[in-house]
Image (cartoon, grey):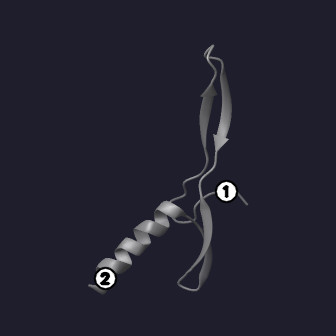
């Protein structure tokens, strides 16, 4: 199963660390996935989606 957010479909990106001589070493930068139960379904959700869901829940409760 891929490391991908079930809501926004975001996945890992590529980044580079560069030495003093500007030689680049490619790295894989993963996203912060957490398991969360949403509407009775267990989903892998990134933390930015979790913050957005919390914001919408707070607006709905006002």
The residue at 48%/68% (across/down) is 50
Q: Relative to 34, does residue 39 appear above or below in the rendering?
A: below
Counting from the top left corner in percent of width and height, residue 54 is at 41, 74
The residue at 61%/62% (across/down) is 33
Q: Relative to 2, does residue 23 appear above or below in the rendering?
A: above
Near-viewer residue (44 or 22): 22
Near-viewer residue (39 or 51): 51
Q: Quadrant of the N terminus?
A: bottom right
Give me the disc on residue 60.
Answer: 2
Counting from the top left corner in percent of width and height, residue 35 is at 63, 72
- Residues at badges 2 and 1 in contact (C-beta under 8 Å)? no
Residue assigned mark 1:
3
Q: Relative to 30, does residue 62 appear above or below in the rendering?
A: below
Work out how far the residue at label 2 is from the one at label 1, CA to CA, in angstroms.
30 Å
The residue at 53%/84% (across/down) is 39
**Residue 22: which quarter of the image?**
top right
Q: Is residue 10 left or right of residue 27?
A: left
């Amino acid at each position: 199963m891929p490391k991908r957010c079930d809501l926004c479909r975001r996945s890992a990106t590529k980044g580079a660390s560069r030495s003093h001589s500007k030689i680049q070493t490619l790295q894989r930068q993963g996203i912060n996935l957490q398991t969360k139960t949403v509407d009775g379904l267990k989903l892998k959700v990134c933390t930015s989606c979790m913050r957005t869901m919390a914001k919408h829940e707070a607006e709905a409760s006002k």
